Amino acid sequence: MKATAALARALGFCVWGCVNFQPTLTHAAPPYLEIYQRATNEFACAEYFKPAETKTSTNELSFALAPLILQQVSVAPEPPSLLDRFGTLSVSNGAPVLDQSRPTIYWGSDTVQVNRRPHARFFYVWCYSPGPQAALLMQGIRITLNSDGQPVIWEVLADGSGAKVLFVSQNLEAAALAEFGKLLPRRRYAIERNAEAAPEVIVARVIDDGPIPMGPIVYLSAGSRPVSTLICRCMPAQARKLLATSTYDLVPFQEASTNSLIMQARVMLGERAGFWPGDDTGGKGLEACLRLPKVFSSSRGAIAR
């Protein structure tokens, strides 16, 4: 119990860093042009992280959907900054400790009801140490699958602008365009709701659909740690040079002794995160953000290409 309580403080410590950094939306400049701009940026140098394989992991969907991480490195040939290293969260003498020598991403899954049909969701979160210029102390993504089991929506845990940042698949955007017609004012994609109904929601980019269910490549900006962009593994890379390749441990959220701490951390974070593991908003959360086409929850979750 003492270890669990201490870990709760550690997790809350990460979340509190996110909360304090978030500016109010009234001070941001809709439609968050910087989010669109960085989605197409190319990193000069980056460090590459992939999930470590185990005897059983390669046969599991949680492994297949796990993200590949490209962490921007500001200046070559310097090694990647420790400030941008995510690690393993633990407790030492009752205090939170992040072991940066052991990169770890925590994952979990659930099912969300949209249009009375179940859809699988997977989330992946990771933690950082505080730093003088580090904005976000926790980052992550959540992936929602369509009725065919294909990943089609990716939500970002936190963005420094205060926006709820999402990425959607090309097939889903095409289905939205076919069903709803033209784009709404001040929006870039047909799947986006009008700016008045969801002013904080930004679909940063539409990405290609993979041939099979697989995790995205997540590009993380140096220093401030936002998700610069997210792409399918089948798309061209947006980094010119990889300085290092490392593996991270993929650990179930429950095994991190955090499952019972979700509500405590969420109370601290409030509505300032794009999502939170174990939230109970159900499909209404996505439906409030996006104009989901009927095909999303039909027996065919994607239109033919």
Image (spheres, rainbow, N blue to C red):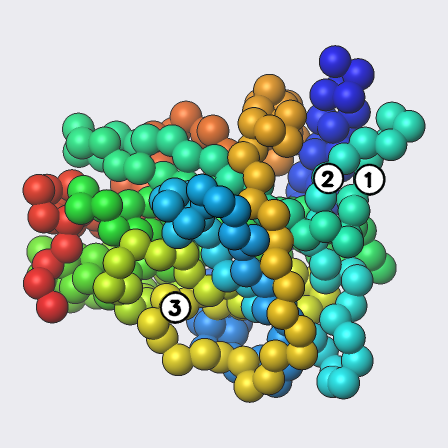
Q: In this view, does 56 lie above or below 36?
A: above
- Where residue 235 appears, as percent x and y from the top left, is 36, 75
Q: Distance between the residues labelled 3 and 2?
A: 28 Å
| Residue bearing mark 2 | 89
- Where residue 199 appears, as percent x and y from the top left, is 41, 52
The C terminus appears in which quarter of the rendering?
bottom left
Q: Earlier in the sequence, mark 2 or mark 1?
A: 2
Outermost residue on the top side: it is 1
- Where residue 276 appears, as percent x and y from the top left, is 51, 36
| Residue bearing mark 1 | 97
* Three-letter residue code for mark 1: Val
Name which residue lies at 55% across and 60% down.
50
Name which residue lies at 38% across and 31% down.
110
Q: Say which of 14 and 4 sits in front.
A: 4
Give the quarter of the image for residue 221: bottom right
Q: Say which of 217 and 49 sits in front.
A: 49
Q: How far apart are marks 2 and 1 (CA)?
A: 6 Å
| Residue bearing mark 3 | 233
Q: Earlier in the sequence, mark 3 or mark 2?
A: 2
Q: Say which of 200 and 296 sits in front.
A: 296
Q: Residues within 10 Å of mark 3 (few under 14, many from 20)?
A: some
* Three-letter residue code for mark 2: Leu
Q: In this view, does 13 lie above or below 210?
A: above
Q: In this view, does 212 lie to the left or right of 293?
A: right
Q: Earlier in the sequence, mark 1 or mark 3?
A: 1
Q: Is residue 153 left or right of residue 103?
A: left
Outermost residue on the right side: it is 93
Residue 3 is at least partly visible in this image: yes
Q: Is residue 286 above or below residue 240?
A: above
Name which residue lies at 72% across and 62% down.
84
**SS under mark 1:** strand
* Three-letter residue code for mark 3: Arg
